[in-house]
Structure formats: structure tokens, C-alpha cells
Image (spheres, helix red, strand yellow):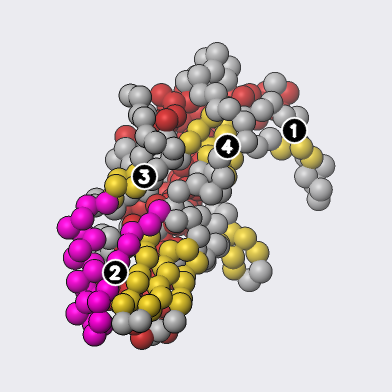
């Protein structure tokens, strides 16, 4: 028998985000697994053969999870930890042996989630499968990027240094655990909405598959205050920890929970006032 659980794109983690503090949403590796940092965020040179290993795993944590399977399965068990981007859980029986491969996010999962993992693999338990789907959706930020950036990243602008801003926001709001990439985007012209004859400009964007934040270069001017650039970066960082989901056939980008977190930015009201006052200048720049 062979089974697998794929990453459920646009699946909303029901009830998980509501009412939690912001630092609890911060993307982080499991304490017992460490991913090789991206060179963009590394302040010291790293040298590894090819691209591997991607993740260093604490053997004690792996063995503890393996023992859970051994207690429920009558034969030998071989548990492997992965950094896969699509298959979160795979398993197969080879003779009497049960072979299981799971994403490292399960190493520090709550006991109830680990119990669901065991029940799903051994007994194909349906409620356990649903619980695992919710857990994977709420921990999507632990999954590494599926695509590299399509162009070189430039973080230092003429006025604003995006890496310095990212690190400051990361420390203040995400306990230094946010691991997305960031860079200045290309200068693009403003767009006109199809239903309304008004021009719009996208000041920031976030790519899930690249785990990449792009900031519009129109913000790299002396008349644009640093706190406003920080707000745009913070907004896009929230997209990394609070993914879009589908509801009634449409994609919801900014649910109420997102707006609540957004307003925790220290200069939120000030940033909104500045944007309303200077939107015309941003459109003309």
C-alpha cells in the first residue's frame, strides 16, 4: 500500500488564525530541524556540496516520532524526514516494514497532530486526514520555495535599503523568524481598473511559489518616508504567514484576520494618512 498527502493550496486553516497573537503566526522551522539559509539572508559564507543537505534534523526528535509509529504498528518502521515542497506525507509497506516519509513540520507538531499522523498512515482514518490537512495549511510557511526568483534581487536602493527594513520589521513583529526573500521590483506603469476609470499602482507583491516580496521602485525616493516603506513591507510579509484561500468560488486575499494583524503596525494610521495625501504623486512618479 502506498499513500501520500499533498500540500492543499488555498485551503483555509479553519479556526486556527483567529484570536492568536501575531508572533504565533511567524514562520519558523521546527526547533528540531534547521534549513540551510538562503545566501541572500546569510551574513557569512556557506559552502555545501551541490544543494544538499537542505535540512539538518535532530535525530532524537526523529526517533521520538518514529517510536509513535512503532507503538501502533506490529512490524518494523523506518521514518524519514523531508523538506519536500508538495508531498507532505508519503508511506508504503514493503513486506513487514512500514516506510514513512514526512515533512519536518511534523517534528514539533502537537501530540494530537502526531497521533492523527499515525492513525492516518496506519488506518487511513478520515478525521485524522482532515486534521492533518488543517495543520499543513496553517504551517504552509515552513515549506520552501518551489521556484527560484526569475531575476536577480536588488535590495539596496538609492534612498531605502529593503534588507535593513525587512530585518527591522522581522525583528519587531516576527521574532526574526520570517524567511521570505525581498527585492525592488521593476518600474511599471500604472494600471486602469476595468470597471472604474481610475488609475491604480501596486506598491508591493508577494509570490507564494518563490517566497518573494517585491516592492515598487516608486517608493525609493527621499519624499517617501521610511515608515511608509516599512508598512508596505510588513503588509507583504503578512501575506507570507496568512495565505489566500477560496470561499464561494473566489480567492480571499485580505480576510478580517489579515486586517486585524495589519492594524498592529506601529504607524498604520499614519501610513494610511500619508498614502491618501500622496497617492497622486505616487501615480505620477
Give residue 85's position: percent from left, percent from top: 48, 55
Residue occupied by mark 4: 149
Label 3 or label 1, whichever lies nearer to me, is 3
Give residue 208's position: percent from left, percent from top: 54, 49
The residue stretch that appears in magenta: 57-83
Mark 4 vs mark 2, CA separation in Å = 35 Å
Mark 1 vs mark 4, CA separation in Å = 23 Å
Could you tell me which residue is drawn at 19 percent across and 65 percent down? 64
Residue 71 drawn in magenta = yes
Residue 6, visible in the rendered structure: yes
Position of 201 with respect to 162 (left or right) is right
Label 4 or label 2, whichever lies nearer to me, is 2
Could you tell me which residue is drawn at 37 percent across and 64 percent down? 102
First along the sequence among labels 3 and 1: 3
Position of 3 with respect to 176 (left or right) is right
Up/down of 274 relative to 148, above or below: above
Secondary structure beneath dot 4 equals loop
Residue occupied by mark 1: 190
Q: Which mark is residue 78?
A: 2
Quarter of the image with the N terminus is: bottom left
Residue occupied by mark 3: 53
Amino acid at each position: 500500500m502506498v499513500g501520500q498527502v499533498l500540500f492543499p493550496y488555498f485551503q483555509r486553516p479553519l479556526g486556527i488564525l483567529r484570536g492568536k497573537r501575531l508572533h504565533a503566526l511567524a514562520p519558523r522551522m521546527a526547533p528540531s530541524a534547521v534549513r540551510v539559509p538562503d545566501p541572500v539572508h546569510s551574513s557569512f559564507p556557506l559552502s555545501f556540496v551541490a544543494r544538499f543537505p537542505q535540512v539538518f534534523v535532530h535525530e532524537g526528535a526523529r526517533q521520538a516520532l518514529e517510536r509513535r509509529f512503532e507503538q501502533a504498528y506490529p512490524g518494523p518502521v523506518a521514518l524519514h524526514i523531508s523538506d519536500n515542497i508538495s508531498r507532505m506525507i508519503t508511506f508504503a509497506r514493503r513486506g513487514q516494514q512500514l516506510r514513512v516519509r514526512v515533512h519536518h513540520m511534523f517534528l514539533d507538531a502537537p501530540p494530537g497532530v502526531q497521533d492523527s499522523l499515525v492513525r492516518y498512515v496506519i488506518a487511513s482514518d478520515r478525521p485524522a486526514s482532515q486534521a492533518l490537512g488543517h495543520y499543513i495549511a496553517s504551517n504552509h510557511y515552513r515549506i520552501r520555495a518551489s521556484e527560484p526568483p526569475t531575476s536577480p534581487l536588488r535590495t539596496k536602493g538609492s534612498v531605502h535599503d529593503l534588507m535593513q527594513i525587512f530585518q527591522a520589521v522581522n525583528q519587531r513583529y516576527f521574532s526574526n523568524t520570517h524567511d521570505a526573500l525581498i527585492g525592488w521590483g521593476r518600474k511599471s506603469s500604472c494600471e486602469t481598473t476595468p470597471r472604474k476609470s481610475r488609475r491604480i499602482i501596486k506598491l508591493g507583491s508577494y509570490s507564494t511559489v518563490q517566497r518573494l516580496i517585491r516592492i515598487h521602485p516608486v517608493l525609493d525616493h527621499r519624499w517617501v518616508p521610511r515608515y511608509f516603506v516599512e508598512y508596505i513591507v510588513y503588509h507583504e510579509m503578512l501575506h507570507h504567514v496568512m495565505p489566500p484561500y477560496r470561499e464561494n468560488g473566489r480567492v480571499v486575499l485580505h480576510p478580517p484576520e489579515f486586517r486585524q494583524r495589519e492594524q498592529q503596525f506601529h504607524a498604520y494610521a499614519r501610513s494610511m494618512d500619508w498614502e491618501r495625501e500622496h497617492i497622486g504623486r505616487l501615480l505620477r512618479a
